[in-house]
Amino acid sequence: MPRQILKNLGLSDNETKIYLTTLSLGQAAASTIAKKCGIKRTTTYSVIDNLIKKAFLTTFTRHSIQYYAALDPYVLVDRCSQKVVEAQRTLHEMNRCLPILDGLKEKHRNSAKTYYFEGLKPVLESYIQFIHNVPDNGTLYNFVSPAPAEFTEFRQGMRKFISLRKEKKIYSKSICILSDDGIRLKMADKYENRETRLIQGIETNRFSSELLVSDTRILQMSYLKDCLFSNIIENDDIASMQIMLFEIAWNDSKKQDEAISQDPKVLKRIQELKSVQAY
């Protein structure tokens, strides 16, 4: 546990090992530290220099021999506390500056920017980046395909995106292929500030991707078996075209959704899906 915490503070494996060894020794020469750690002396000197620069070790000379001592753990805790305070102050200042920084982008509104994300964490972060840039009380246009059950971490991570969307009071218009997940999605609409319309599709061959559109940008995501990725395109013209195409699909989906909602098989399935897991 201490090793991981020290790594989180920016120390390498060797730096962590030498800091902990020096802490246990109290005060020691480099040769003693190297022997105790099982690290070459030349490497030890280099690592010690780095730790001194990072203020994790101090040094002093006694009887012409240079000794090293580790920074007291309580001082490290105090340092971390100071960083938390500084981070909170920086966050506060950043929030104050956001309108100014966002205004600097105005002159580039008509140019296109593309951002690519790959892997679970980056893809989830792309959703947060996207929703942060949708104005409060705005509308989100969504061709949604709920992630398969095996994508547990992704489904859990999406809760933050949905919570942020609800917090910003962004209304979502969603089109989803008929499936158990699609039914659950529609059942949860009244809790999620969303309207979902179901359309017919082949359940065994449904698309494994999603498209979100706002007034100025689009997010495309695909959860292929071996490659979860997404991209964001910032461009007013492309976003406007995608919204127009969505509205065409939205209008066409109304009759399908009404027919599906009255289908006895679907009504029976709704009763069977007793526990509603919002997505």
Image (cartoon, rainbow, N blue to C red):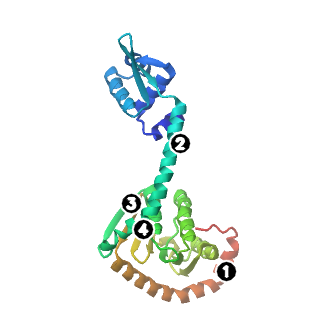
Q: Which residue is mark 2?
A: 81
Circle 4 — which element? helix
At 35% from the left and 78% from the top, the residue drawn is 236
Neighbour class for label 4 at 10 Å: few (<14), some, many (≥20)?
Answer: few
Residue that carries the numbered disc 1 in the rendered image: 267
Q: Amino acid at mark 3?
A: Phe
Residue in the foreground of this view, choosing between 220 and 215: 215
For the residues labelled 1 and 3, the Cα–Cα distance comes to 39 Å
Q: Are marks 2 and 4 in contact (CB under 8 Å)?
A: no
- Of the residues under marks 1 and 3, which one precedes in the sequence? 3
53 or 9, nearer to the observer: 53
Query: How far is the residue under mark 4 from the one under mark 3?
Result: 26 Å
Sequence-wise first label, 4 or 3? 4
Mark in the foreground, 1 or 3: 3
Mark 1 / mark 2, whichever is N-terminal? 2
Count neighbours of disc 3 (C-alpha within 10 A) and say few if under 14, some if 14 to 19, many if 20 or more.
Answer: some
Residue 99 got which mark?
4
In the rendered image, is residue 253 in sight? yes
